[in-house]
Image (spheres, coloured by chain):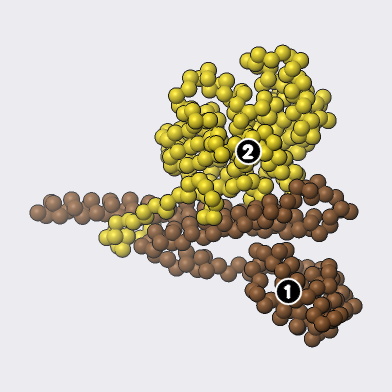
Amino acid sequence: MSAVLQMAEVSKRYRRGGRELHVLRDADLELHAGEVLSVLGMRGQGKTTLLRIAAGMESADAGVVSFDGRDLATLSDGELSRLLGARIAWAGKSGPGMRMRMLDYVAMPLLVGSKSSKRAAYAQAQSALERVGAQACADTEWESISDWERALVEIAQAIAAQPALLLVDDVTDTLGIRETDELTALLRELARDRRLGVLMSVSDAQATLWSDRIMTLSGGRLTQGPQAPSGNVIEFPDLGIPRRGAERGSIS
Amino acid sequence: MLGLIIEQPDRGFGVERRLGERFSSARFSYSTAYNALYRLEKDGLVRLVDEDTYEVTPEGSQRFRAWLRAPTSMPVLREELHAKIALCEPRDLPRLIDVVHTEELACISELDGIRERVLAEQREATVRATVDEDWTRLMDRGVVHGEAAFWGGRIAQLGQLRNYLEELRDEAERRALREHRREDGRARRAG
């Protein structure tokens, strides 16, 4: 299987409120075409940052991020934005941010900077909505649809341009058991049918059940379970502290 | 066990197998089903219909319905790990972080096992199932989600705990270094 996304020793720090936050520490990840990989972690653990770095929306402080074998750091802003529109897709929970029909919303990335005609873009958008089973939302607006329909519309918009990599940012956390199963099973079908690599961030473990692999993100460390067949498992760090001080010192 | 026999009269071996399939996270030991069937038969709640196949008796059926409707008991939180944390000293932190991380990996592995089970059983067909189609599988989905949520919660809690212990370890390390430098300075001044 070819790797659609590779991250090697990726690190990212932020300064917040005078404190340095190590969001990613030497994160390694490999995602193949047709594969669904879930990254499970609590809110605020850097899952969205990981996805943004994978999409080239944000740069890493260290390490290499490659899409389809191309190092994202070597690409120009123009090349990156073209990739993001066509080959790398994003599904989140933000919606259009303005009043519009969901068909227009799904068609939007196809119309911006694309060579295809308006008619072709709308046909593609309609077909994407049908593929996810959200055709009934075509003429409605974001404010009048449910969380479940919003998740479907976001997926429809993401797959409309036939991307190779789909980044799904925590779309299941407001869904119930049935909806979570349906959505994650749908992502699995899409990955299989379209040879799509799906990297999905989730805060509920139930949303990982239809994935091919699970990784966890906590304290900046991306970890894979011990039984998984591929990918990098973090080495347990050398945790030696000065013996003299440790024996004498107390934590206060 | 009664519920499994009500679902389908079965031999000890069959009950053992179904118990493992339906409640794998509970890790019942090998002889659980046989011992339970023996006790249930002694209490008149199941009976043998032929040489080795059990079926439920009317009393057994009644007992099962009563159990199903009764409130469930709260699990007791008695964690060996909590005791270790409560009683550790600063010098134990590195090893304790190691212990927490090992358990974290074990929990990820448990979650991974549930995921593999879900995929192996090809639940695609039942994703959109309704109550009149496949009741057992729909109920099983509730159990699977409960198990996944349990391991997910534990993974989150252990990750949070590891971060906390690492912060404390770093703090202890910084403090030790400061003291070390202060002692060095004192020694130099004295020399």
Type of amino acid under label 2 = Gly
In the rendered structure, the answer to whether residue B61 lies left or right of residue A100 reads right
Chain (brown): B
Q: Look at the image and tell me whether residue A5 can be seen.
A: yes
Residue that label 1 marks? B13
SS label for mark 2: loop
> Which quadrant of the rendered structure holds the C terminus of chain A?
bottom left
Please identify the quarter of the rendering in which residue B190 is found: bottom left
Q: Residues within 10 Å of mark 1 (few under 14, many from 20)?
A: some
Residue drawn at the location 72% of the way across and 54% of the way down: B121
SS label for mark 1: helix
Residue that label 2 marks? A34
> Which quadrant of the rendered structure holds the N terminus of chain A?
top right
User: Residue A87: x, y in percent?
Assistant: 60, 26
Question: Chain A colour?
Answer: yellow
Quick one: B33 or A223, which is closer to the camera?
Answer: B33
Residue drawn at the location 72% of the way across and 76% of the way down: B33
In the rendered structure, the answer to whether residue B177 lies left or right of residue B186 reads right
User: Residue B182: x, y in percent?
Assistant: 22, 52
